[in-house]
Image: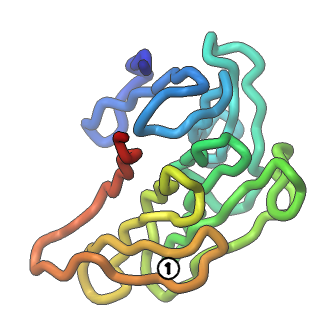
C-alpha cells in the first residue's frame, strides 16, 4: 500500500509523492526510497530520499532540467526525462553501474527524437518501458525495450494519449 503526501502545486496541478513499501503494486518500488524531481539546486533534477523525507540526495547534475522519475519494479533502475530546448528524451539509471550510477554518473539516453518522449513507466518484469510521445504528430502511447530499442506505437487516436501505467498480472 502506498501513502500519498501532497507536496505543492505546479501549474495549478497538485503534486504528490508516493511512499511505497518493497512489495507495493502499480508504482514500482524504491526499496524504502522515493525518487522525485526538484528545483532546489537551481534547475529541476532527480533526487532520491528516504520515505520519511530524510537523506535527500541529488542523483542528476545536468545542465538541462530532469523530471518524471520512475522506479523499476526491483528498484535496480530509474527511468527519467531530460528536457532539452527542442525535445524531451528518456534516460535510465542502473544501480549495477552498466548505466547511470545512483550518484548520477554514466547516464544512458534511451530516446533521441526531434519531439518529446515523456512519462516513462516500467513494465512489471522490467523488460519494457511504456511512455508518451508526440513523435507522430500528437501524443500517443509507445512501448520500448528497457534498453531503448524497438519502440512500438500502441495507440493511434486523434486525441491526446498520455500517462501510461502498467498493472502487474494478477494470478
Which image quadrant: the C terminus? top left
Q: Is residue 29 left or right of residue 114?
A: right
Which image quadrant: the N terminus? top left
Give the image location of residue 25, x and y in percent: 44, 33
Q: Which residue is mark 1?
A: 86
- Residue visible at 46% across and 27% down in the picture: 17
Instruction: Please state which of residues 116 and 98 is positioned toward the viewer in this rendering.
Output: 98
- Residue visible at 60% across and 48% down in the picture: 72
Instruction: Please state which of residues 52 and 84 is positioned toward the viewer in this rendering.
Output: 52
Circle 1 packing at 10 Å, graded few (<14), some (14-19), many (20+), is few
Q: Quadrant of residue 32?
A: top right
Give the image location of residue 16, x and y in percent: 40, 27
- Residue visible at 68% across and 73% down in the picture: 109
**Residue 98 position (above or below residue 10):** below
- Residue visible at 64% across and 15% down in the picture: 53
- Looking at this rendering, what residue extends furthest in the top direction? 52
Give the image location of residue 131, x and y in percent: 42, 65
Instruction: Please state which of residues 62 and 19 is positioned toward the viewer in this rendering.
Output: 19
Q: Is residue 41 left or right of residue 117?
A: right
Q: Quick one: SS at disc 1?
A: loop
Give the image location of residue 101, x and y in percent: 85, 51
Q: Quadrant of residue 157?
A: bottom left
How many discs appear? 1
Amino acid at each position: 500500500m502506498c501513502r500519498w503526501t501532497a507536496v505543492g502545486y505546479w501549474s495549478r496541478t497538485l503534486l504528490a509523492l508516493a511512499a511505497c513499501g518493497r512489495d507495493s503494486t502499480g508504482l514500482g518500488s524504491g526499496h524504502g526510497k522515493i525518487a522525485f524531481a526538484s528545483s532546489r539546486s537551481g534547475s529541476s533534477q532527480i533526487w532520491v530520499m528516504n520515505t520519511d523525507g530524510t537523506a535527500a540526495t541529488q542523483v542528476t547534475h545536468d545542465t538541462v532540467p530532469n523530471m518524471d522519475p520512475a522506479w523499476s519494479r526491483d528498484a535496480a533502475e530509474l527511468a527519467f526525462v531530460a528536457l532539452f530546448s527542442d525535445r524531451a528524451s528518456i534516460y535510465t539509471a542502473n544501480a549495477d553501474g552498466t548505466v547511470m550510477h545512483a550518484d548520477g554518473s554514466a547516464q544512458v539516453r534511451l530516446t533521441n527524437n526531434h519531439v518529446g518522449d515523456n512519462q516513462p513507466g516500467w513494465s512489471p518484469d522490467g523488460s519494457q518501458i511504456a511512455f508518451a510521445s508526440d513523435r507522430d504528430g500528437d501524443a500517443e502511447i509507445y512501448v520500448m525495450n528497457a534498453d531503448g530499442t524497438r519502440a512500438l506505437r500502441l495507440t493511434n487516436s486523434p486525441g491526446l494519449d498520455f500517462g501510461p501505467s502498467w498493472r502487474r498480472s494478477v494470478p
